[in-house]
Amino acid sequence: MVVQHRRRSGAIAAAAVVVGAMVGGCSAAADASPGADPGDTVRRAPDALTRAGTSKARTSMEMATGGTRVTIRGEGAYDFVKRHGHLKVLLPEDPSGAEGHRPITELLAPGALYMKNRGAGVPADKWVRVDTTALADGNLVTGGATDPAAAAELLRGAREVTYVGEEELAGVPVVHYRGVSDLGRAARAASPQVRGALAAAAKGFARDAVPFDAYLDREGRLRKVRHQFSFANQGRTVAVASTTLLYGFGAPVVVSLPPREDIYAGRIKA
């Protein structure tokens, strides 16, 4: 299963990296009072994350096509003020028993994704830089992990939101909401650093509607969100369920982007 994206300038762009590598009470959480509008509550979640500053993050991306299902996992941290973060993305084991893939280090920045251990012809000491505003999915799927800021900002386009109930997530009381996010609406309402990538996704996905389940804590902070994407790839429909978990708010986040000379400029194999 390979998804490829090309830069709009016509030069070679990165292949979809990871995809191509593998065939309590109401008062205890977000405002769940009878008079509260679930849609407004969910759409305010990205602002609550900005107020929180930073968090640790875990990601999971499940892909299914043609009877094949793979899961890609990531772990790292994100700064919702500076809009940058880092993830270590773990590819699933090769079912043939061949030597496993090395973890991919990803650096997330406004409008860009940097990857190390990309493989497929990229030197081990080099990074690959991808312009996320030129990707058909805005890096909601390409990197094997949805950028935590994009995952949250997608909720600005929330509609048809319903209150599901109160739950406990890793010992934290949360309120569960379910709805559909409109990609175009989310892109228009998103923060400037994320707007370009979401605008690209709004144009690139066949459908604007992205179903989601969101879990908010008492401060209105997003603790967990699961998005369900669907796109066409080589004549097949690929179903993707992307889950982002946020915890450890206030954790330090240090991101040093690679210098220009460490960025690979050659052709990237699929």
Image (cartoon, grey):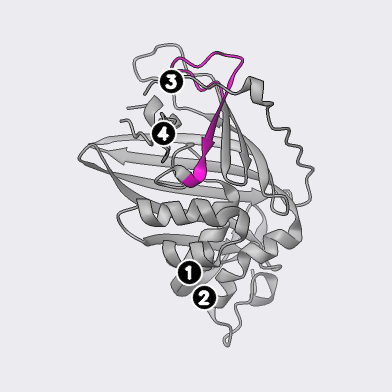
Instruction: Answer with mark 2 or mark 1, whichever residue precedes in sequence.
Output: 2
Hey, which residue is sitting farthest left in the picture?
Answer: 235
Q: Is residue 22 above or below residue 79?
A: above
The structure residue drawn at horizontal position 58% and vertical position 83%, both measured from the top left corner, is 36
Q: Is residue 266 above or below residue 225?
A: above
Quick one: which residue is furthest to the front in this view? 9
| Secondary structure state at the residue bearing disc 1 | strand
Question: For this view, does 218 lie left or right of residue 167?
Answer: right
Say if 91 sits above or below 80 in the image: above
Q: Are marks 2 and 1 in contact (CB under 8 Å)?
A: yes
Between discs 3 and 1, the one toward the N terminus: 1
According to the picture, the residue beneath numbered tag 3 turns out to be 267
Q: Is residue 117 magenta?
A: yes
Tell me the residue at 44%/27% (across/down): 92
Q: Is residue 182 visible?
A: no
- Of helix, strand and loop, which one carries label 2? helix
The Cα atoms of the two marked residues, 4 and 3, are separated by 14 Å
The residue identified by callout 1 is: 158
Residues at circles 4 and 1 in contact by the CB criterion of under 8 Å: no
| Image location of residue 23, percent across then percent down | 32, 27
Q: Residues within 10 Å of mark 3 (few under 14, many from 20)?
A: few
- Span of residues in magenta: 116-133
Q: Position of residue 127 (x, y in %)?
A: 58, 24
Query: Where the N terminus falls, by quadrant?
Result: top left
Tell me the distance, in whole angstroms, between the alpha carbons under discs 4 and 1.
27 Å
